[in-house]
Image: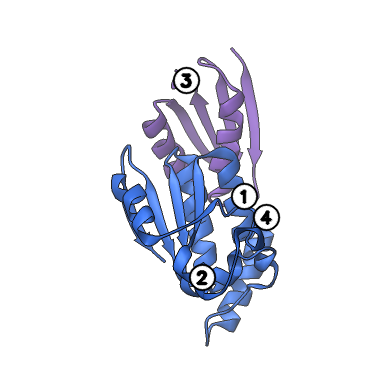
Chain colours: A blue, B purple
Amino acid sequence: MAGGSLNIIMSTGTVDKLINMGVLVQTAANLGVPVRVFVTATAVPAFKKDGYKSANVVPYGFNSVINEMAVGLQKLKSGDWHEMLKTAREIGEVKVYMCSLMAGAMNLKKSELDPMVDDIIGAAAFMQSASDGQVMFI
Amino acid sequence: MVTVNIDSRGTACPGPLTDIIRAYKKASNGDILVVMATDPGIKADSKSWCDRTKNQLVDVKEKNGEYTVTIKITGKS
């Protein structure tokens, strides 16, 4: 990844995956690595306007471990995934794109998305912009 | 040359490194950042960041679960 970018396909909207994304994006921003996040599939609701407030879906069977994790993260003064993403955008070059197919399927306009979503783009545009770096699927 | 103290105790990865970046943005070459942290990840993370950004990791000390990391700013262009 030296000199390249980190390109995350954010496909799963459970809270554990969103936290993973937040940590990776903030870390990449810390290291000066440009980041692009492509939001699709079940991650879409979390990136609707104010979606992060209600999109705390816990993966089936993991309630107790997620609760334990949430308490521990609060003790560590660690922000939630949305705050991590916001911090990353303050300190680094971080872009968030909504998948145009999913936006069309769910009848979503840009004005209905989280203000951190920079644009609605297709997979081809994302692949093209990601060609200079590493692609990660979450 | 300015020495900036950063208190990241009680926060966890990637928080301490973000605190360093915020201070770094205001710093100049020759300045010293002294970071206090309780997250053990700060040892490897600060080294990785210094290697990547061409800043100098001067010292990492550990005492009773607290880390003091000293960085000299050399990577500003």
Disc 4 chain ID:
A
Between A5 and A72, the one lying in front of the other is A5
- Pointers 3 and 4 in contact (CB under 8 A)? no
Q: Residue furthest bottom?
A: A61
Disc 1 chain ID:
A
The amino acid at mark 1 is Lys
Q: Comparing marks 3 and 1, which lies closer to the viewer?
A: 1
Residue at the spot of label 3 = B76
Residue at the spot of label 2 = A104
Q: Residue A119, relative to residue B56: is it above or below? A: below
Query: What distance separates the C-alpha of mark 1 from that of mark 2?
Result: 26 Å
Please give the name of the residue rendered at 60% of the width and 52% of the height, measured from the top-left corner: A116
User: Can residue A11 be spotted in the picture?
Assistant: yes
| Label 4 element class | loop
- How far across and down, in percent of the image, does residue A49 sit? 67, 63
Q: Earlier in the sequence, mark 2 or mark 4?
A: 4
The amino acid at mark 2 is Gly
